[in-house]
Image (cartoon, rainbow, N blue to C red):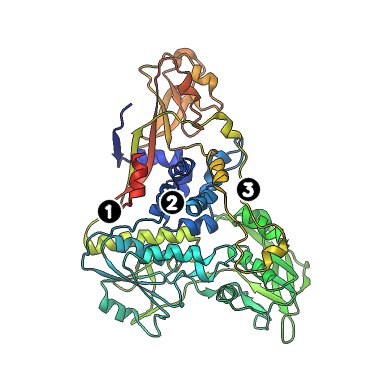
Amino acid sequence: MSNKIIYSKQQEDFDYIAVNIPCQHACPVNTNIPAYIRALFESHHSSSYAINAMANIFPGVLGRICSRPCEDMCRHGEKELGNPVNICHIKRAAADLNKTPAEPLKPLPPCGKKVAVIGAGPAGLAAAHDLALAGIDVTVFESFDKPGGMLRYGIPRFRLPRTILEKEINRILKLGIILKTGVHIGDTLSLTSLLENHDCVLVAAGCYTANQLNTDGEDLKGVFSGLDFMIDVCSGRKPAVGKRVLVAGAGFTAFDCARSALRLGAEEVTICLRRTEEDLTVTADEIFQTKLEGVKFNALMLSRRILGTQKVEAVEFVRTRSGVLRPDGKREISEIKGSEFVLPADSLIVATGQTPLELTTGDGKLAVTDTASFTTSMSGVYATGDYLSGPSTVIEAISMGRKAAEVIARRLTGKKYRKKVVRMQETQVTDRLRAWDFVPRQAMPAIQGTTARLKSWAVEVETGFTAQQAAEESKRCYLCYLHYEIDIDRCIYCRYCIDVAPRDCIKLVDRIETNEHGAVTGLHETSVWKDVNAVVIDNARCIRCGECLRVCPVDCISVTRVELMEQGPPSDSSIAEHKNA
């Protein structure tokens, strides 16, 4: 077997990744998921953490609060194969079990350029991280007293311990980034003055203007915006919510508000949904933990007005009917006339989304002019994260921050310091056992009993995998970065491989369809023996069990490890160690 490594920039190979490694393709930052899962299985916890950090920067944070688009696309979750791999919790395990402090990354030599980043949330910190690695002097301006943005001020400690957040923020700041907190752009500092002292400005100020219901009674005491409510809670303040709390909203913020209200002493908390529970986009684990703590769900209802004299006493709702799916994936809803009803409440938390703060230039409001290039109406000023897109997930914000940093670094230096490549290396057959396909998905251990959960804000509800649980869950990964291929010149058409395949992934074909780049897009099967031109492994169906290779009498099946990676400057020793393993 040759150990030769090939790095490809051919589009057909990128197309192959998109189809055959669906978890990595679904991740907004293209985390090399099979690689870090395999590293963890082999007890290389530092390598597993480093592989994560190379792409998503915040492994310990994301392992707790990521929205998990990768799991939605995991091949193990296909209909006849069971449940997806618990990718997110394996990510957390890589951080929790890593006892080796990560070596400082080595930025490129200083290039003499300076960038100001407005906002120390996930997008701003991710951008600052990459700009610093490119040798650019970076100063981050944050309006809050501490960095983290909504990671610190929007997610409660029982989901994200602050020690984890601070550890990963400090790892970024150690690159030489200057952080200035308590700075409000527009009040104490203008965009114009920032540009006078920096080559570029990147606005990553997030979404800090809460949406309102625009209904009667919204100014009553006891009505909170979900955004302000969580900022108060995460800052250590304790809003008075009373005994009966209604939460309007269906996102992560609504769920955090509901669970936080319980910890503030509420006896009855209800999340009010315009659509149905099946339409929720929060993770199944979050729904489960929220219900376990006693939060109720009421679906197909829309608030009409808030009732009360000086404070909230009740909320009037109308029933809704869900309809067809819209292009954005949400269902149309319509009100059912005459279905009004009233629910008593001591407080109402409105968690229906946020919009970006308005920043002004000398010519008026700062406007985004091109989302692809991150440019704005002010020359030299760029925008990224939620300020660019509106409310997004943490992993999406990190992705936008990194992409914006690449655009700015290229503009300032004239060089592209990061590039995507497909790395290919012939490897041994997988050592996965067929029995591992039937290992049940490992449940995340959590504190049991509502009393124990609610006694302190600092109690992290989910306690994390043990090393044994993490290794057991990692067995379930099919390692989709392994590419199986039959050498048709050596194949004797015995069909042993087809007989042992546990899935219809090896096919007799008379022709192969490709796209304009040369990537395989379809296999045309035939049952007529004389028309068979090849025996082909469909890697989009393959579960990498290795049975075909083990029974092949002429050894005509090869296995290649195919990975989407980044080439460019710094990599720490643990990543290099993993590459050479």
Please tell me in which quadrant of the rendered image residue 193 appears: bottom left
- Residue 312 relative to residue 112: left or right: right
* SS at mark 2 in the image: helix
Image disc number at residue 95? none
Query: How far, Cα to Cα, is label 2 from label 1?
Result: 19 Å
Q: Which residue is mark 3?
A: 443
Q: Nearer the viewer, residue 319 or 61?
A: 61
Where does the image place residue 422, in percent across and percent down from the top left? 34, 41
Please tell me in which quadrant of the rendered image residue 365 appears: bottom left
Q: Which quadrant is the C terminus positioned in? A: top left
* SS at mark 1 in the image: loop
The residue located at (66%, 53%) in the rendering is 278
- Residue 216 relative to residue 234: left or right: right
Task: Say which amino acid is labelled 3.
Answer: Ala
* SS at mark 3 in the image: loop
Where does the image place residue 564, in percent across and percent down from the top left? 37, 44
* Callouts 2 and 1 close, C-beta under 8 Å: no
Q: Which residue is mark 2?
A: 49
Can residue 239 be seen here? The reply is yes
- Residue 360 relative to residue 89: left or right: left
Q: Nearer the viewer, residue 122 or 106?
A: 106
**Is tag 2's residue or tag 1's residue first in the polypeptide sequence?**
2
Where does the image place residue 309, in percent across and percent down from the top left? 74, 86
Question: Which residue of the protein is positioned furthest toward the front in this rendering?
Answer: 99
Label 1 environment density (alpha carbons within 10 Å; few <14, some 14–19, many ≥20): some
Q: Which residue is mark 1?
A: 569
Task: Say which amino acid is labelled 2.
Answer: Tyr
